[in-house]
């Protein structure tokens, strides 16, 4: 049996390399082999820090008898959902035709053309509680394949047609919501608040960071968001020792969490807690932001500066794999234990979220080291993941880049992070790189029904299955690629006055305005952008001489103009040195044109839609 996973970039795939299952990685070879043998395909999707993925691997994929059945009657493909999010999204949509309890591990049975005809999540080794065993499922699928092939092929075709039709309906343009409609969405979210423990809904309970970002942006939602954030900070969802948040809690009171800690959650929560501090000035928000940043910089940061995707939920204690055991230990006990493994995969889009959060939070809370770290991560990702033609790779480990196709999430997430870095530090190279990424996505759209598209096209194999969705507007725990790219385009408009960026952001949000109004809990990031698009944009530029505390230097006057500007609620706040502002203006970022200091003092320019008030040099004036 050929070991095809041993050299994979993905740590998740490498963890399955020694299984007795004859795994293929995602690629055309697996489907060609299924056609040659005339057998169905198993597409098994998971990720490195997924607890139930570990369980199914131990119970079934490590069992020689189960593996023998899989090898004899199927071609089996192992997919890291974080390396191939578009593949995961496509098969999740297909799986929704067969099961309501979607999650990971995701087990999809498909034809040799890639069309799904049955799916489920975790299957136990022995049937229990009405849930069939994995071997029973395998036997049933083999029976259907051999005895009712026409029915199987027909079902697979119907699923593909239904998904295509649903995707077309999901991207029907609607008018953007006005302020009243946005506040109605706030009210709908407030109705789902848990009045006893905070958060939204019952169990399981997630941090829903994009929703919190939207609520913080609306005056009608700020109190709800701040209350939620405070309760989360004091809950078991947050590791009290090193400050990182776990992915979700299985109980309503935030207890019994699933202990994996994800880069995207913690990046967005860092941003949310920094915003909450800017609004309230309360110590709990600052303390929690400091803790989250410490986790990002102390645990997930890799040599070179980029960030790993996650930390595992399980650790080895006394020779046994235990979920959460490490996190139950106090600091002294932890010093004697081996920490849970890190999924060292560096993902472009998720690093963009972290770069943006560290830069913005560093600006708000006056943490120069965070801004410096954001810059180092940006340079690392651009150096490793940007190809000579300007397009991006999706993932890497130790500098080796995966052949996985980058998604819109990668372009938008990285561009947005680079723009936040430029605003916080005056980094003209970051701003220019962000503009190039957004421009590539605009050019790739080529006048289609969506203003943004992936440069070079999406995953070609997925396209061939008929399951690929050109525009995936769905949001879960972090912004969709569509929203992330539209948000970056809007920020570019605020910095360049380029109306085409504003038009593109609006057109993109019109594609999700209808679903976002109906299900605000699933479109927090889109609603946050729509909220910013709803009013006249406000921009604040503060220009200082080098000694005054921008670009990674502490404030010379902690009560002065720069300190006040850090917490200002404008749509864009930029703190730059005079020479940096001049370089940005020369590079085409019009907001910075003719912005200099007055009498050598830090000088603030407050603008509404590029019409600026007279410059001021005092906190009271601002």
Image: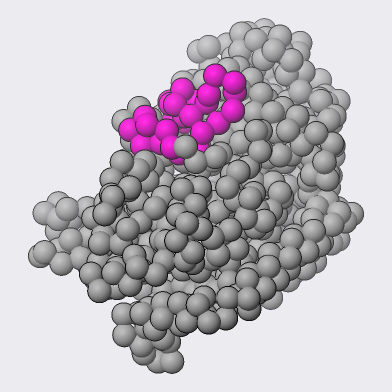
Vertical position of residue 355 compared to residue 586: above or below = below
Vertical position of residue 174 compared to residue 54: above or below = above
Residue 91 or residue 383, whichever sits in front: 91
Task: Find residue 405 and report its horizontal and vertical position in percent.
Answer: 54, 40
Judge from the rendering whether residue 259 lies leftward or rightward of residue 341; answer left or right: right
Residue drawn at the location 41% of the way across and 81% of the way down: 139
Count of number-bearing discs = 0
Vertical position of residue 146 compared to residue 558: above or below = below
Residue 308 painted magenta: no
Residue 486 or residue 33, whichever sits in front: 33
Task: Find residue 566 and report its horizontal and vertical position in percent.
Answer: 59, 33
Instruction: Tell me the magenta residue range.
Output: 374-402
Residue drawn at the location 54% of the way across and 45% of the way down: 271
Residue drawn at the location 50% of the way across and 77% of the way down: 146
Q: Name the image quarter holding the C terminus.
A: top right
Residue that sits furthest to the right in the current view: 175
Vertical position of residue 359 compared to residue 117: above or below = above
Task: Find residue 331 and report its horizontal and vertical position in percent.
Answer: 19, 55
Residue 92 or residue 425, whichever sits in front: 92
Residue 92 or residue 195, whichever sits in front: 92
Judge from the rendering whether residue 61 lies leftward or rightward of residue 524; answer left or right: left
Task: Find residue 550 and report its horizontal and vertical position in percent.
Answer: 54, 21
Residue 159 in sight from this viewpoint: no
Residue 390 painted magenta: yes
Residue 173 in sight from this viewpoint: yes
């Amino acid at each position: 049996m050929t070991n095809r996973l041993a050299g994979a970039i993905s740590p998740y795939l490498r963890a399955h390399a020694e299984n007795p299952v004859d795994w293929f990685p995602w690629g055309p070879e697996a489907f060609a082999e299924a056609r040659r043998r005339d057998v169905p395909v198993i597409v098994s999707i998971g990720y490195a820090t997924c607890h139930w993925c570990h369980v199914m691997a131990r119970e079934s994929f490590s069992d020689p008898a189960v593996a023998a059945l899989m090898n004899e009657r199927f071609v089996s493909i192992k997919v890291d959902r974080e390396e191939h999010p578009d593949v995961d999204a496509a098969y999740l949509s297909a799986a929704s035709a067969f099961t309501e309890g979607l999650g990971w591990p995701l087990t999809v049975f498909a034809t040799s053309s890639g069309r799904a005809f049955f799916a489920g999540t975790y299957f136990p080794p022995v049937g229990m509680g009405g849930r069939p065993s994995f071997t029973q499922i395998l036997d049933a699928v083999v029976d259907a394949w051999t005895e009712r092939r026409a029915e199987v092929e027909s079902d697979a075709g119907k699923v593909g047609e239904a998904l295509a039709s649903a995707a077309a309906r999901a991207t029907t343009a609607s008018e953007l919501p006005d302020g009243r409609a946005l506040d109605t969405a706030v009210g709908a979210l407030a109705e789902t608040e848990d009045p006893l423990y905070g958060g939204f809904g019952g169990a399981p309970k997630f941090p829903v960071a994009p929703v919190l970002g939207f609520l913080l942006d609306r005056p009608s939602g700020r109190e709800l968001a701040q209350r939620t954030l405070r309760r989360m900070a004091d809950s078991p969802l947050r590791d009290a020792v090193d400050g990182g948040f776990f992915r979700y809690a299985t109980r309503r009171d935030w207890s019994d969490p699933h202990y994996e800690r994800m880069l995207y959650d913690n990046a967005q929560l860092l941003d949310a807690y920094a915003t909450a501090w800017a609004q309230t000035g309360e110590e709990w928000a600052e303390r929690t932001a400091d803790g989250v940043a410490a986790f990002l910089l102390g645990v997930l940061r890799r040599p070179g500066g980029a960030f790993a995707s996650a930390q595992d939920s399980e650790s080895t204690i006394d020779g046994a794999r235990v979920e959460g055991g490490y996190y139950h230990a106090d600091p002294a006990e932890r010093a004697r234990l081996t920490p849970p493994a890190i999924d060292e995969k560096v993902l472009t889009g998720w690093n963009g979220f972290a770069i943006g959060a560290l830069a913005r939070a560093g600006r708000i809370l006056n943490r120069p080291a965070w801004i410096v770290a954001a810059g180092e991560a940006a340079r690392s990702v651009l150096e490793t993941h940007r190809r000579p033609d300007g397009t991006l790779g999706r993932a890497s480990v130790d500098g080796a880049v995966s052949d996985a196709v980058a998604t819109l999430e990668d372009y938008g997430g990285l561009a947005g992070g680079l723009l936040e870095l430029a605003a916080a530090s005056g980094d003209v190279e970051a701003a220019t790189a962000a503009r190039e990424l957004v421009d590539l996505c605009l050019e790739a759209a080529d006048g289609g029904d969506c203003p943004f598209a992936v440069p070079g096209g999406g995953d070609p194999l997925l396209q061939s299955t008929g399951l690929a969705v050109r525009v995936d507007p769905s949001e879960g725990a972090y912004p969709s690629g569509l929203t992330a790219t539209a948000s970056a385009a809007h920020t570019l408009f605020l910095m360049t006055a380029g109306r085409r960026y504003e038009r593109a952001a609006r057109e993109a949000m019109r594609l999700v305005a209808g679903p976002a109004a109906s299900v605000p809990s699933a479109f927090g990031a889109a609603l946050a952008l729509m909220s910013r698009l709803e009013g006249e944009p406000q921009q604040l530029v503060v220009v200082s001489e080098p000694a005054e505390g921008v670009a990674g230097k502490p404030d010379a006057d902690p009560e002065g103009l720069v300190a006040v500007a850090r917490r200002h609620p404008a749509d864009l706040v930029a703190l730059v040195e005079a020479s940096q502002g001049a370089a940005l203006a020369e590079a085409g970022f019009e907001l910075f044109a003719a912005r200099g200091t007055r009498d050598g003092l830090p000088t603030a320019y407050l603008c509404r839609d590029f019409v600026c008030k007279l410059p001021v040099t005092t906190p009271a004036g601002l």
